[in-house]
Amino acid sequence: MGTWGFGNFQNDAALDYVEGIADQLRSQLQAPTEIEDLLMLIAQVDMLRVLVEHCNARPPEEAELIALRDACLAIFDEEKEEFYSTPEDAAERRSIIAKTFRKFLKVRKDWD
């Protein structure tokens, strides 16, 4: 296909590069039962969302995102007392995690 527009990510070379990065991120999101670093994982989720939304990367399936969201929130609920000194701080962080997945699920739906 080569080039299909004038944008920075509207050519095969740029899309191949983006997909390489996205593949690395997607592979790290595959096993929600083995989450070791929740903070890093949420950052990776949001980075992948940006690549999907702005750089034409292929998103994970909706069911994968939902399973990952549920696993992340469950882990957060189990571990929040270790990281947050007040219930208000924990609630704010949980809200941001949930919002991250809501945004990605919307981007996913719009991508179809």
Image (cartoon, helix red, strand yellow):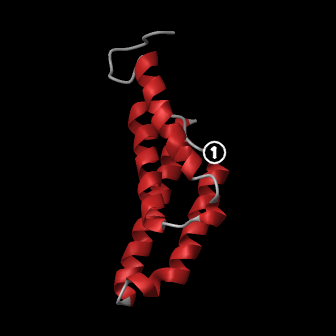
Quadrant containing the C terminus in the rendered view: top right
Q: Residue at x 51, y 9 (%)?
A: 1
Residue 56 seen anywhere in this rendered image of the structure: no
Residue 5 x %, y %? 38, 14
Q: Residue at x 62, y 64 (%)?
A: 34
Residue 39 seen anywhere in this rendered image of the structure: yes
Q: Residue at x 41, y 80 (%)?
A: 91
Residue 29 x %, y %? 57, 53
Callout 1: few (<14), some (14-19), or many (20+) C-alpha neighbours within 10 Å? Answer: few
> From the viewer's perspective, is residue 87 above or below residue 5?
below
Residue 10 x %, y %? 40, 19
**Looking at the image, how many numbered discs can be counted on the residues?**
1
Determine whether, in the image, residue 75 is placed left or right of residue 2.
Answer: right
Determine whether, in the image, residue 36 is placed left or right of residue 81.
Answer: right
Q: Residue at x 61, y 67 (%)?
A: 71
> From the viewer's perspective, is residue 67 above or below residue 87?
above
Q: Foreground: 101 or 29?
A: 29
Three-letter residue code for mark 1: Glu
> From the viewer's perspective, is residue 83 above or below residue 45?
below
Please, what secondary structure does the residue beneath circle 1 have? Answer: loop
| Residue, disc 1 | 61
Determine whether, in the image, residue 30 is placed left or right of residue 79.
Answer: right
Quadrant of residue 65 in the image? bottom right
